[in-house]
Image (tube, coloured by chain):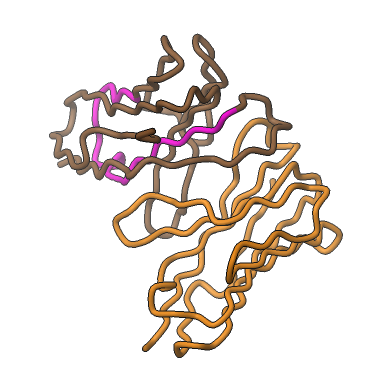
Chain colours: A brown, B orange
Amino acid sequence: NAGVTQTPKFQVLKTGQSMTLQCAQDMNHEYMSWYRQDPGMGLRLIHYSVGAGITDQGEVPNGYNVSRSTTEDFPLRLLSAAPSQTSVYFCASKLFGTVESTDTQYFGPGTRLTVL
Amino acid sequence: KQEVTQIPAALSVPEGENLVLNCSFTDSAIYNLQWFRQDPGKGLTSLLLIQSSQREQTSGRLNASLDKSSGRSTLYIAASQPGDSATYLCALWIKAAGNKLTFGGGTRVLVKP
């Protein structure tokens, strides 16, 4: 298994540009999520999904869109990039989508995004 | 709102010393608690998961305890090595937060040879 993969590893955008961060997992996990990590702010949840066709907002969803058309993929779209979106983005997944499940969450290697 | 706190934010110990990392939380109604390790510039690696009904979990030199009544979890790393240098984060699945993982701020550990 490749686990959780993310592309690209690094990206530089200009203010106002749009782009999609890719996330894929090959473990048939129901639950997938996106976090951003900023110095002094820790890890904050952006969006999550408990299965194909189902998405929900996390703590900091503004400026980001997600979709879950397949179990494997969970792309994160920046609609109009802003300097405040400069961050490291992590995708994560776990086997079951139910909140009561006690399974481990696995993280991807991250995407470092800079918005000028 | 649930607060998850890790104190201290940074810790430096000589090689061979035992590490004790703390995680405190305000809401004891949790599903489980997970400890992660993060190396600089890398993603998070899961170390241990403690279910709400458990008191501790062990893996090699690592032992994590959970005391819901006092809102605390402790990660013990025995006989620390320079390779243990990393940031350690605790995270909780909290019933009131829904289907979301809530993270502490992390403790950055440096083990000196």
Which residue appears at 50% of the width and 68% of the height? B107
Residue, x 46% and y 33% (percent of image)?
A: A46
Start and end of the magenta stretch? A76-95
At a point 38% along the width and 87% down the height, the residue shown is B112
Give how far across and how far down residue A61 sits, in percent. Answer: 45, 29
Mark count: 0
Quadrant showing the C terminus of chain A: top left
Q: From the viewer's side, name the closer residue of A22 and B9.
A: A22
Quadrant for residue A25, please give it: top left
Whole-percent x and y of residue B49? 64, 51
Asked which quadrant contains residue B79, the reply is bottom right
**Of residues B62 and B108, which is closer to you in this image?**
B62
Residue B2 image position (x, y, % from top left): 69, 48
The answer to whether residue B67 is magenta is no
Relative to A47, residue B28 above or below? below
Q: Residue at x 45, y 36 (%)?
A: A92
Q: Residue furthest right?
A: B69
Residue A93 magenta:
yes
Residue B65 sits above or below residue A43 on the image: below
- Please, is residue A37 above or below residue A25 in the view? below
On the rendered structure, is B5 left or right of A5? right
Image location of residue B94, percent across then percent down: 71, 42
Quarter placement of the N terminus of chain A? top left
